[in-house]
Each structure stands twice: as C-alpha cells, then as structure tokens.
Image (spheres, grey):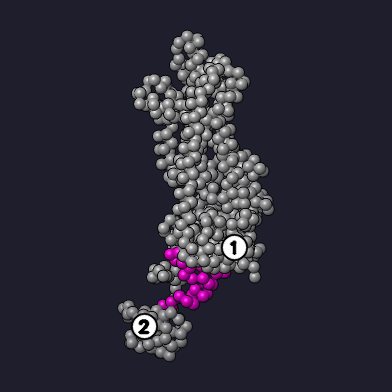
Amino acid sequence: MTKAVQVQNISFSYGKQPVLKDINFAIDAGEMIGLIGENGAGKTTLLKLLQDQLPVGGQISIFDHPVQDKQVHDWIGAMPQGDLKLPGVTVRELLANLSTSYSNPADIDQLLRDNGISALSKKRLDRLSGGQLRRVTFLSALVGQPRLLFLNEPTVGMDVNARKKLWMQIKQMQQAGVTIIITSHYLEELQDVADRLLILQSGHISFKGTFAELQDQHVQALFRFMSSLSESQLLQLPAVQSVTRLGSYWLLTSNNGDQTMNALGQYLNQVHELTVTKQSLSDIFSEMMHQEEPK
Amino acid sequence: MRSLVQQFKFDVHREILRNLPFLFFSLLMPAGFYILFTKVMVSGTQSEMQQFSGRYMVSMIVYSLIISAFFGLAALLQRDRRSGYLTRLSQTPVGLKAYYGSIAMCFMLMTVLSTGLMFVLAIGLNHVTLSIGQMLLILIVSLIGELPLFVISVLISRVQREETLSVISNLLTFPVAIVSGLWWPLTMLPKWLQVVGKSMPTYRLNHLLNDIVADQSVSVYDWLVIMSWLVIALVAAMIWNLTLRRWQQGVTE
C-alpha cells in the first residue's frame, strides 16, 4: 500500500516553547484520518508542517516525496480554519483565482454545480452567511483536484443539514481515492467517516488507531441497579473499578462491561432494574485529556 | 508569468475597481482638496495662482501616495493575512511570488491613476503648463520615490489587530503630510519640526517633483534622503523576517 504521508521524528518549537515532540506516524493512500486534541495541543502546527508551511526538524514525505518538493504542493488541498472572507470578490472569482496556481485545476463551474452552490457563484464573499462561506472555503481546497486533503474544522458554523451534506461529500472524495486528514471537535461525526484517529496531547501522540481500538482501551461501562449484594461482593466482580451507593441504587463502573455483565449474571435473582450505559467518545476524549500528561 | 497576470487582474478588481474607500480617500479626497484650495480658497496675482496650482498639484500627488500606502496597501496586506488568503495562496504550487508582484503592480497602478487625475485637474482647471516629458518624469519619480512608503506599509501591515493598524496609519499619515509641508508651507512650523520635516522621504519627493514642475534640475540630496529611507526600511523588514524565521526555526531535533 502506498503511503500518502510518512512522518518520522518530528519535533517543533516556537522559540523555546516546544509544541510537538517526537511525532511518528504513517497514513495509507485513500485513508481518512481524524486528528484531534485540545486547543494548543499542536494540531494546527502539525498540519502546517505537513503542508511545508513551517521549517521541519525530522522527515515528512508525501506520496514518497519530501514535503519540501514543489510538486508536492500540487497534490495537496487545504481548507484553512478561518474563512476566506475577501471584500469585493465573488465566489467564482476566488475559486478561479486559486485554481490558476495548479497544474491540473478543477472546472470551477462543475465544482460549484457538484456542490449545489451554483446560485452563489456571483455573490460577494462578504455577503455570504457563515455556513455558506465555510462551504466556499471547503471548495477552495478542491480547486487543484488534490490527492491529499487537509480539512481544519470543516463544519464549524454549518447547520445540521449542511454538515450532513458535507460529510457525505467528504466520504465520496475518500471513495474516489483522496487521502483526507480532518481536525474536528465533533467526535461523533468523525467516528462516522474516519478510518483511524490520531490524538495529540501536549505535543505528543497519545493514541493512534481505530475508533474500536480506542473504545476497547478506554471505554467504561456504567451499571446502575438495585441489589441486596454488599459493596465488598460487588468490588470482587471482574473489571470493576468503583462501587458507589446512590439512594437505593448501586452505581458501578467497569473497564470491561462484558466481563462484569457475565459475572453479574450469576446473581440475577438479586439484581433488579439494571441499566448499563457506555461512555461516549466525547467522554473518553475528555477523560484522556484530564489524565496526566505523557512524559 | 501567467499566474502574475491572473493575480493582477484579480487584485485590480477587488482593490481598485470595487474598493470605494480607495477611490474616495486616494483619488477623490486629494482631488477635492486640490479643487478647494486652488479654485475656492486662493488669492493673489494670476502668475502666483498659476505657480501655487502647480505646487499644490505635486503636494496632492504625494498626499495621495501616502494615503494609498498607509491606508490602502497596509490594510490590504493585513486583511489578506488575517482572512487566511495568504496562507491559502502559500499552500499552492505558485506560492506568494505572484501575489507580491501583483500587489506591487497594483500600488503602481494606483499611483498612475492618482497622478493622472491630478494632471487632468491641474491642466484642465488651472491651466498649469506641463509638457509630456515633465508629466512622464513626475510619474517615474513618483513611482521610485514611493518605494520607502511601500516597504514601510508592508512592515506596519504585520501588526495583528485591525484597530492597531488603523491607529498607526492615522498617526503616520497626517503628521507625515503636515511635517512634509504638503498642507501648508514648512516655514509655518517650529524650527525643530522643520528639521524633522526635511528629513522625511515625502518632503524630499515633494521637493523633487516641484523641481520638475518648475523645469529645474533635480537635487541629488533629495534622492539621497529617499534612498536612505528605502535602505533603512528594507533592513528593518529583513530583520523582522529573520527574527520571525528564527523564532519559528527553534526546532528541537
């Protein structure tokens, strides 16, 4: 499998302030990766390094070429975090302006049609709504027909329908073979589209893998039930991490819900009104961020 | 070359043809001042009025250049950076070369427009006598003489906040115009301020252009001061870029 991105031993500091420390990862061609981390974790800096926007310490290759190669820029499309709100410029003019820099530019009218915003073609950028502007900014990343696409918070400011449409389109692009790296705060949305996840924490990669692997490693199940069992009996159940009394209910957390459930099954006649809930991705992420920083 | 031409077309549309603040402040306002001070609030003999019309034409050309640089150009560069447009362009295979080339050409076009308008007013309304050669020379000297303003604008556009840039632009434009003797004679200012005024590139440019209008030989000293400002501004810009790059290059491997 061709590697779209290979990153080896990347470290980066702004002055004396370290931002990224010894980053290593690889992305296969055609993969879609979610890059997440708290504000200030180094996501934007990492994206800039991957786009040759900052001098790099370490090695980055894009489709087996050093990121500094000029032709690499021709393969990359990037959607910035901010919106391209230029006064006095129409949607079509902006996209046409950016497309002239690429050797294989997209047909702008076709691009607008495919994205259902032909009607905005002659509208000035400073007269668009936030969601419309975000959509145009997204299209600005596609004008060079990229093989590798960076999307920084693509759905910020969009309503639910527009977000759905955009994710669908992003998925279609991946199916067409485009490699995509997305940063987003909407983790549940990322789960629906991304193949793998990279979590940045204080300049380190604290997790890389699939969503299923993340959940296997970190998910906690929460059991709530009424029972005559004692606290010490409950604590002896496999994978149980904590037991708390809440009125007439027991609250029990487990890092392996299946194991605990099987064991609890032995006491079914003593367990009533049982509910089991699993942590959401956002809960896991939030918990990871509040754990001690990796050394 | 194709990229430069495309970028230039794009920038002319947004920065000149569809930019009302530019059209008003850089073209109409100096033109309005010119009409006001040479047709309405003026007295003296015919010959004195003729001379004043020529001098004031030059003053308003220089004033227009200052406005275009400190308000037009600096604001444009800052806005393009803040909106992410510069970042987006820098991600393309062409990078920022075509952009900066086009911006310089736009700035020159603004100069041609404002100078041309002043010629039309001076000759049409006040019958100032200017040969084609003099007009061309005024244009060429203006284009070279404005270079320090161009570099200073690039420098001040680096400030992060829009409000800060607006304050800096105001603080630069009006005092510089006054101490350069563009609004009233320098002799009306205190002695120490006259010394400051005479060291300004805009005063020297005004002086050079007046020499051309009066058909006199131009002063080498004027050029020396303008070029010194250009060198100082370029060195400051280089130091700024170097500092920024060093700060970014603190890479721990």
Task: Identify the residue shown where x is 64% and y is 68%.
Answer: A2
Q: Residue lying farthest top?
A: B45
Span of residues in magenta: A193-222
Q: Is residue A205 magenta?
A: yes
Please tell me the numbered disc located at residue A61. Answer: 1
Task: Identify the residue shown where x is 48% and y is 48%.
Answer: B242
Tell which tag, 1 or 2, sits nearer the viewer.
Answer: 1
Please tell me the numbered disc located at residue A8. Answer: none
Q: For the residue labelled by badge 2, is the local secondary structure a helix, a strand or a loop? A: strand
Q: In this view, does A201 lie above or below B31?
A: below
Q: Can residue A65 be seen in this view?
A: yes
Chain containing mark 1: A
Chain containing mark 2: A
Pointer 1 local density, CA inside 10 Å: few below 14, some 14–19, many at least 20: some
> Where is residue A203 shown, x and y percent of the image?
45, 64
What is the three-letter code of the residue carrying label 2?
Answer: Met
What is the three-letter code of the residue carrying label 1?
Answer: Ser
Task: Identify the residue shown where x is 41% and y is 22%.
Answer: B186
Q: Is residue A12 above or below residue B8?
A: below
Do residues under tags 1 and 2 come within 8 Å of each other at their CB atoms?
Answer: no
Q: Is residue B118 magenta?
A: no
Q: Considering the image in quadrants, where does the N terminus of chain B appear?
A: top right
> Where is residue A12 shown, x and y percent of the image?
47, 60
